[in-house]
Image (spheres, rainbow, N blue to C red):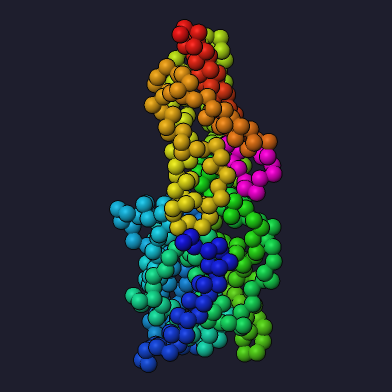
Amino acid sequence: MRVAYHSNIRQIAGILLSITFLCILHNVNAQGIQLSEDSQISLITILPGDAPEELFGHSAIRVQDLQNNIDLSYNYGTFHFDAFFLPKFIYGDLEYFLSVAHYSASRRYYLEQQRPIIEQVLNLTLSQKQDLFEFLRVNAQEEYRYYQYDFLFDNCSTRIRDLFEHVLGDDIRFSPEMASGFTFRDMIHLYVNHRPFIQSGMDLLLGNRVDHIITTRETMFLPDFLMKEFDHATILVNGEIQPFVATTKLPSHFPDEISNAGQPWAVLLTWALFMAGAVITYKNYRDSKIFERWFDLPLFTVTGLIGLLILFLWFISLHNVTINNLNLLWAWPTHLFLIPFLFRRPNSVLLPAAYLSLLIISCLIILMGWSLWTQHLHPAVLPILLLLIIRSGWIALRVKNEAAKVKREN
């Protein structure tokens, strides 16, 4: 059975986290470390890097107590990379876990990647710090540390948000849960607009469930926005409402701001393909003997493979946000069955014009409702739709003409 939508996921995750916390409170080692008054707990935000897995940044928790010789980084974004990682990623069955490391080693690792680190020291009572530390310490044990990763609803940032909400309870207050004005897709675009092929790939594979307006709480799936909400949050300290963040330690330098106005290379590429297809189709019209199958073969092969992947992500994988994908209306997996026929002389039996006519109608429907669909379709899709229309139209016309010619000869 497919996993429920994100609201149900959040409720279930909240219940499980509450149960885990209750278990922790009742099973804390009696000889556990007691933090000193000078101890600090901080939210660590690592700014985005250049690698694909670094594009959205990272969050961790730092627990520091010099009197007890403690300076640890708790990281919910750890996973085992092995030969099966990519298949598990595509299937949506990723097991992440909470890891613990010396903060100096973690900091050095990110600085070597030239990724600035922002530390927000939190305004907490000793009792609140102790509860958070005990939760983290026990949650890092083997029987508690693993969880099923979800990019939007259960990741290194949402785990931290949920942790503070459940441990601190009513003492912590985030911004009122109201519409942010963004969709999940909008939020993702903020980080991948400068990487046009990654952006177009994500747009292609994500369904319409990422196109609704989300709340301010839901924006905290991104480390930058978790940091922002911590800045705006308040905490009850000794009966008084105070800012949740006591001090913020900024890096000595920030990377150059990424421009979101980069060249739309994916869109330019697909328009170039359309222009090539239009030229080929015009030459076909002038001389029907021109050999064009080596253009049509990759066109229908690639679109068929895209459709096969969309079909898998929608109906087989565990992902929640890859279902209801309107791109399946043009990227039909059945295009792959056309491949053998593109090497043969077209006729009404081997390459039925009815199939291509249905494809043309489907593409035209998408184009006519382009601004009305509940799913955002990437601009690079538009020239592909036009290309499928003109090439399918020409092939269907050739099929019809060849069939008529064979009929006359007989």
The one nearer the camera, 282 or 404, is: 404
Q: Position of residue 27 (x, y in %)?
A: 40, 88
Residue 349 painted magenta = no
The one nearer the camera, 104 or 125, is: 125
Q: Is residue 328 left or right of residue 349?
A: right
Report the magenta residues as a range: 369-381
The one nearer the camera, 343 or 207, is: 343
Q: Is residue 375 above or below residue 295?
A: below
Q: Is residue 94 visible?
A: yes
The one nearer the camera, 274 or 269, is: 274
Q: Of all residues shown, which one is farthest toward the left?
A: 83
Q: Position of residue 266 (x, y in %)?
A: 54, 36
At x 61% / y 77%, what residue is drawn? 244
Q: Is residue 101 above or below residue 345?
A: below
At x 53% / y 64%, what residue is drawn? 4
Main secondary-structure element of the magenta-colored stretch: loop
